[in-house]
Image (tube, rainbow, N blue to C red):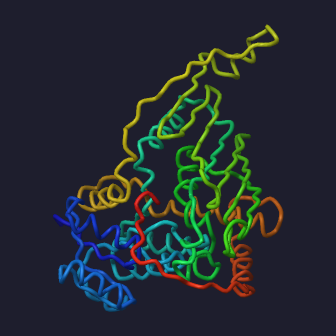
Amino acid sequence: MDKVRIGIVGMGNMGKGHTQYLVKNEVKGGQLTAIVDTDPARLDWVRENYGDQFQLFDNLEAFFASKSFDAVLICTPHYDHPAVAIQAFEHGYHVLVEKPAGVYTKQVRLMNEAAAKSGKAFGIMYNQRTNPLYQKLRDLITSGELGEVRRTIWIITNWYRSQSYYDSGGWRATWAGEGGGVLINQDPHQLDLWQWTLDMMPTRVRAFCHFGKWRNIEVEDDVTAYVEYANGATGLFVTTTGEAPGTNRFEVSGDRGKIVIEDGKLTFWRLRTPESQFNAEYKGGFGSPESWKCEIPVGSSEGSQHKGITQNFVDHLLKGTPLLAPGEEGIKGLTLSNAMHLSTWIDNWVDLPIDENLYYEKLQERIQNSTYKKETKELKNMDVQGTH
């Protein structure tokens, strides 16, 4: 195989975004050959903008039966990700799925099992893993340069979304349509990076989610969560879509200093002597370890983003390049968001791994008992640039 033929499932905002770079041949070795969407208007949009360059389908059965592609890129609403992926694996296709992997871990676990059974490649669109800032942070932590992690604090409040955004689609910001709010829509990348850069997951979570606090929605739009790790470290995660101006600051403290990512820069306050060693040896009462402020050089861009993950996926199929974002890892960030929801719903700590059946039960209760009525005012072709 000298090229990978790609079929896109879903022509919403993300599907259109992926189409733009694929049709320009900006992914070497990748070729968009087919598109499926059940909405005739979206297929008409494809014809109007791209003519007859691709095979178009209005149902998944015909799409999968066509064999007109080698891999699928799934860009449907969240709930559909696992079901469509499982179908694709059963038909013998490789799968690259948009974030989040799904809405609840129980369905994502089934998707992971289907991927393993199929033997096909499986990737997830965690495009922030291409960002050199987070790649460098992961390197400094996993190499031991920071020492043992002691505390993490991520304030990610620059996900501002207006009411018009939420009103733009009937599925947005509903338990039945989206399965959550800021945690499931905006924060999957940060929740993934939180565990990926540290190379560890928490052991338990205590969270406080506020539902419809700043917007007329039924899901969470303001969250503060506290986590604990097996080594004794702790973490704090604060997020909202109702704050302007927002903040994006990720701070990780370890035995050998502190690293902060903010405003596109990575700063390392490195201790000349590890804190534990200084504490054991210092006899002067007041005093602290000598610290050097180091501006760590990283790439000037945010990385290759969506296009980069797609290129990596194609390179994996053609050259055996390791996947930067294996699809199976999508369950990790989702576990964190599910745990935050569940902790709020039961007003208590949640141990990891979570009780998947209890989470599903509580989610279904919210769907079935919802009295939320939504007036949809569709905004066509919203620009997703910068939304990650």
Residue at the far top: name it: 284
Percent of width and height locating residue 311:
29, 58
Camera-nearest residue between 101 and 214: 214
Q: In terms of image quadrants, where is residue 256?
A: top right
Q: In this view, does 191 lie above or below 356?
A: above
Q: Is residue 37 above or below residue 329?
A: below
Q: In this view, does 79 lie to the left or right of 289?
A: left
For image coordinates 62% across by 27% down, the residue present is 257
Position of the C terminus, as image quadrant, is bottom left
Q: In this view, does 161 lie to the left or right of 22?
A: right
Q: In this view, does 21 lie above or below 294?
A: below
Q: In terms of image quadrants, where is residue 11?
A: bottom left
Camera-nearest residue between 191 and 317: 191
Percent of width and height locating residue 233:
71, 40
For image coordinates 58% across by 25% down, the residue present is 269
Position of the N terminus, as image quadrant, is bottom left
For image coordinates 61% across by 30% down, the residue present is 258
Q: In terms of image quadrants, where is residue 368?
A: bottom right
Camera-nearest residue between 372 and 143: 372
Percent of width and height locating residue 118:
39, 74
Tally of numbered tags:
0
For image coordinates 30% across by 89% down, the residue present is 57
Camera-nearest residue between 105 and 207: 207
Percent of width and height locating residue 274:
64, 21
Q: Is residue 216 left or right of residue 3?
A: right
Q: Is residue 59 above or below residue 7?
A: below
Q: Is residue 314 left or right of residue 211?
A: left
